[in-house]
Image (cartoon, grey):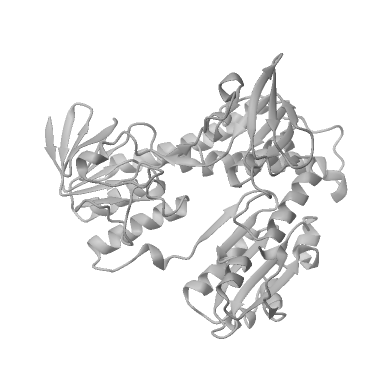
């Protein structure tokens, strides 16, 4: 059956439903096509389930430390993975059901539960239906990459999605990839009782961060018993009597790592290969990401791409912001751009890392005059009182304009505290606004003004490279 709409949204991740809601409220007739589960990566295999498991792992970790706080617990805490999974599944289902219910309540919005493919720049086939619209929006997200490593098909391996479905604790989990996804799962399962080894091809963990941040993260992970093997230039796998053997070509350490299961956390790929984009005139780059301009328009007139599939941000918050940019430009007469936003994200290890703007290394490479302030969490009373003193805070400002250029808060509450700095950056306020603000005691945030009062010239250093 052929049906005509004002707008077609392909994909019900974080950006698509929001956009459909805006169009619906504007009185437009909208079609929303989703071939799998509403909510996308965030709700189903990303933020919601993983942070729920982070919470369970934190509870186990804190229980083991109870005596440090004067609390006596007889015996070691026991991990019931079936209950951990059941709690995670219930929270995911509630979130997904809430979104589905909201979408179904939207006036002028028709939901199609099937795969969408372009037939032309204005036509999309969804199951047995052909949909037409003058405006089409692609929000198909991405999935875990599974590179053709030698022997990977001979061993039991997980991706971030499949690992969420297990109801047991792997005896020894080998994590391939020392960045955000890999490190969060590494700490989760170590706290659940797994032996864990992280294998990273690069010289250090989370390479996009400054070296001092990477070193501090490695330090607290190793303190929990997580093994780290860096500079693994060549990785292959074999099955030895039921065990997984990962063979590494590393500068130091044993050549073989023996475990029971493997997690592949080596990046993501966009879900763009089966959409018929060529029939619509929508171009992609060499990795499959849809090419978009600063207002998220593709190379085909009347077609936009938002969320993970456009390569302009790999986070829920950037996908949501994409939808806001498109809606504001089309419905509100504004001129919003992707380049207006400041990069911000978090690593949800314990302690977490909150990041915004440029790193110290990136600032140093620009050659601009800059100032830097740092504060170890051992000198943050709130962290001391909580018994969580790992990490530090760092902030960089322009020495001439006094605008804040970037910050990293690796420590308890860092994922929340970072937003006060982000807000000041969006306001283009001089750092003195925060420095002179009165923050509540005792908090982590109250040390930001103190840190800003102790700025020193930023110099090129090995720890920032």
The image quadrant where one finds the C terminus is: bottom right
Q: Is residue 95 visible?
A: no
Is 80 left or right of 263, judged from the image as shown?
right
Q: Residue at x 35, y 51 (%)?
A: 306
The image quadrant where one finds the N terminus is: top left
Is 314 left or right of 381, judged from the image as shown?
left
Residue that lies at the very extreme toward the bottom in this rendered image = 400
Image coordinates of residue 425 in percent, x first then y, are: 51, 73
Most foreground residue, 431 or 212: 212
Q: Is residue 19 visible?
A: yes
Most foreground residue, 37 or 409: 409
Q: Residue at x 61, y 67 (%)?
A: 407
Image coordinates of residue 82 in percent, x first then y, are: 63, 25
Q: Which quadrant of the figure has residue 61?
A: top right
Is 26 left or right of 245, judged from the image as shown?
left
Most foreground residue, 42 or 300: 300
Q: Residue at x 57, y 35 (%)?
A: 88
Image coordinates of residue 230 in percent, x first then y, are: 70, 44
Image coordinates of residue 257 in percent, x first then y, are: 74, 30
Q: Which quadrant of the figure has residue 255?
A: top right
Number of marks: 0
Q: Residue at x 41, y 43 (%)?
A: 287
Most foreground residue, 106 or 329: 329
């Amino acid at each position: 059956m052929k049906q005509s709409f004002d707008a077609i949204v392909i994909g019900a991740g974080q950006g698509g439903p929001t956009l459909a809601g805006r169009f619906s409220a504007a009185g437009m007739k909208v079609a929303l096509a989703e071939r799998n589960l509403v909510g996308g990566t965030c709700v189903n295999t990303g933020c919601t389930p993983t942070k729920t498991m982070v919470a369970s792992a934190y509870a186990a970790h804190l229980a083991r430390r109870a005596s440090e706080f004067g609390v006596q617990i007889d015996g070691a805490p026991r991990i019931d993975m079936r209950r951990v999974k059941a709690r995670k599944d219930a929270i995911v289902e509630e979130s997904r059901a809430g979104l589905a219910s909201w979408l179904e309540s939207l006036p002028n919005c028709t939901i199609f539960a099937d795969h969408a493919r372009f037939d032309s720049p204005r036509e999309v086939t969804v199951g047995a239906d052909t949909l037409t619209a003058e405006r089409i929006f692609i929000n198909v997200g991405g999935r875990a990459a599974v590179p053709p490593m030698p022997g990977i098909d001979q061993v039991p391996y997980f991706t971030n999605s499949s690992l969420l479905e297990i109801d047991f604790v792997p005896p020894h989990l080998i994590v391939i990839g020392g960045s955000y996804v890999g490190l969060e799962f590494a700490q989760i399962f170590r706290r659940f009782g797994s032996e864990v080894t992280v294998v990273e091809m690069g010289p250090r963990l989370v390479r996009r961060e400054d070296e001092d941040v990477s070193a501090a993260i490695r330090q607290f992970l190793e303190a929990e018993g997580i093994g780290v093997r860096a500079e693994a230039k060549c990785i292959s796998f074999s099955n030895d009597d039921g065990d997984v053997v990962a063979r590494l070509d590393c500068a130091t350490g044993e050549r073989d790592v023996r475990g029971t299961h493997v997690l592949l956390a080596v990046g993501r790929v966009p879900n763009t290969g089966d959409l018929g984009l060529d029939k619509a005139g929508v171009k992609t780059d060499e990795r499959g990401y849809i090419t978009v301009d600063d207002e998220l328009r593709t190379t085909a007139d009347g077609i936009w791409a938002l969320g993970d599939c456009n390569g302009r941000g790999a986070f829920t918050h950037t996908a949501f912001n994409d939808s806001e940019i498109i809606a504001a430009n089309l419905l509100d007469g504004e001129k919003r751009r992707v380049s207006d936003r400041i990069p911000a994200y978090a690593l949800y290890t314990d302690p977490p890392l909150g990041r915004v703007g440029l790193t110290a290394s990136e600032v140093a490479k620009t050659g601009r005059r800059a100032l830097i302030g740092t504060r170890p969490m051992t000198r943050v009373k709130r962290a001391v009182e909580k018994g969580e003193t790992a990490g530090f805070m760092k902030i960089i400002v322009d020495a001439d304009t006094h605008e804040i250029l970037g910050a990293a808060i690796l420590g308890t509450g860092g994922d929340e505290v970072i937003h006060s700095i982000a807000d000041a950056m969006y306001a283009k306020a001089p750092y003195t606004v925060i420095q002179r603000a009165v923050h509540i005691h005792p908090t982590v945030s109250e040390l930001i003004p103190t840190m800003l009062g102790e700025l020193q010239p930023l110099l090129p250093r090995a720890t920032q490279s």
